[in-house]
Image (cartoon, rainbow, N blue to C red):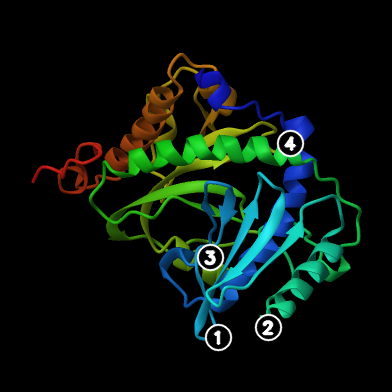
Amino acid sequence: MHHQSWPVIDYAASSETLQTLQLWMQVVGKIRLASTPWLNHSWHVPLYVTARGLGTSSIPCQGEVMELEFDLIDQRLVARTSRGQRANLALASRSVRDFFIAFTTMLRGLGIEVHIHASPNEIPEGVPFLDDTLARAYLPERAHAFWRALLQVDRVLKQFRTGFIGKCSPVHFFWGSFDLAVTRFSGRPAPPHPGGIPALPDAVTREAYSHELSSAGFWPGDPRYPQAAFYAYAYPMPEDFGQAHVRPKDTEFAASLGEWVLPYDAVRTAEDPERSLLEFLQDTYVAAAQGAHWNRAALECALGTPGRPRTI
């Protein structure tokens, strides 16, 4: 049954659809970015896994709130406001320009107009939204499968998060890098990040990496690593980070990425996918924390159990 819960993510068959979805999510994500006060490490900008897809949560809007959700069951982008308004836009093959115009027209119909920086982030040589007239394919079943995988990953990352009482991010989906992530912090400041991430201001990067961290997550792959995978990295990276012993056996340290990676298929087909993923998350965190001499005794606790307060 668990193989049915963890769907197949075929990179070759899904990459074009997911690239299209990433660009659309950038348009929507920038609405939240432009409307929400800045929160440390850009925690005010991500999307969150929902029972139907990926959503923004509430966004301040003219004294009320608005929510935007990619409904990947009905394949619609849905807008809802606290005034009781609702509008939606079909998710179907179209250019980014057409999507951008249709989306902003939909918001104006709700009386909402937000000015955004209308170009993609973290995409090398990204094209401004209104100039991106390339016909882009979108296969609903591929987007739906990706979301079904996110449901499982979100659940396990949230379980992993309960084992840490230090500063820790929510489990959230970054539309720039197009990954679901959770990040733990030692509590100590980190040296300034060198920056240089494509189409991302260095000031944003340096604020995001202002403190020592261990981060892990899931992304559907890209041309550098053309398969869906889990990843883990540390900043700053301890000298021996890439030499640690990390389970399960399919894990490898990708020096070109500076990250530990575990193919999604290795987890999906494991006898116990959740245990395999938790092993990866725990071992890579230990490699980061031990290598950087974190105060683990003050930061860690047992994994949480439903309905039972953490023992003090």
Task: Using residue 143 as the reference point, say whether residue 158 is left or right of it.
Answer: left
Q: Which amino acid is tagged 1?
A: Gln
Q: Earlier in the sequence, mark 4 or mark 2?
A: 2
Identify the residue under disc 4.
Answer: 141
Labels 4 and 2 touching (C-beta < 8 A):
no
Identify the residue under disc 1.
Answer: 62
The label number, if any, that marks residue 42 in the structure image: none
Q: Earlier in the sequence, mark 1 or mark 3?
A: 3
Q: Identify the residue at horizontal 70%, vertical 33% (top origin).
A: 226
The label number, if any, that marks residue 111 in the structure image: 2
Q: Farthest residue in the top direction? A: 271
In the depicted structure, whether residue 259 falls above or below residue 80: above
- Provide the secondary structure element on which disc 4 rests: helix
* Structural distance between the alpha carbons of marks 4 and 2: 33 Å
Q: Identify the residue at horizontal 68%, vertical 83% (top origin).
A: 111
Q: Position of residue 141 (x, y in %)?
A: 74, 36
Q: Which amino acid is tagged 3?
A: Val
The label number, if any, that marks residue 45 in the structure image: 3
* Structural distance between the alpha carbons of marks 3 and 4: 26 Å
Task: Using residue 64 as the reference point, say whether residue 27 is left or right of it.
Answer: right
- Provide the secondary structure element on which disc 1 rests: loop
- The front one of 71 and 83 is 83
Task: Using residue 198 as the reference point, say whether residue 279 is left or right of it.
Answer: left
* Structural distance between the alpha carbons of marks 1 and 3: 18 Å
Q: Earlier in the sequence, mark 1 or mark 4?
A: 1
Labels 1 and 2 touching (C-beta < 8 A):
yes
- The front one of 78 and 49 is 78
Q: Earlier in the sequence, mark 3 or mark 2?
A: 3
Q: Nearer the viewer, mark 3 or mark 4?
A: 4
Residue 198: which quarter of the image? bottom right
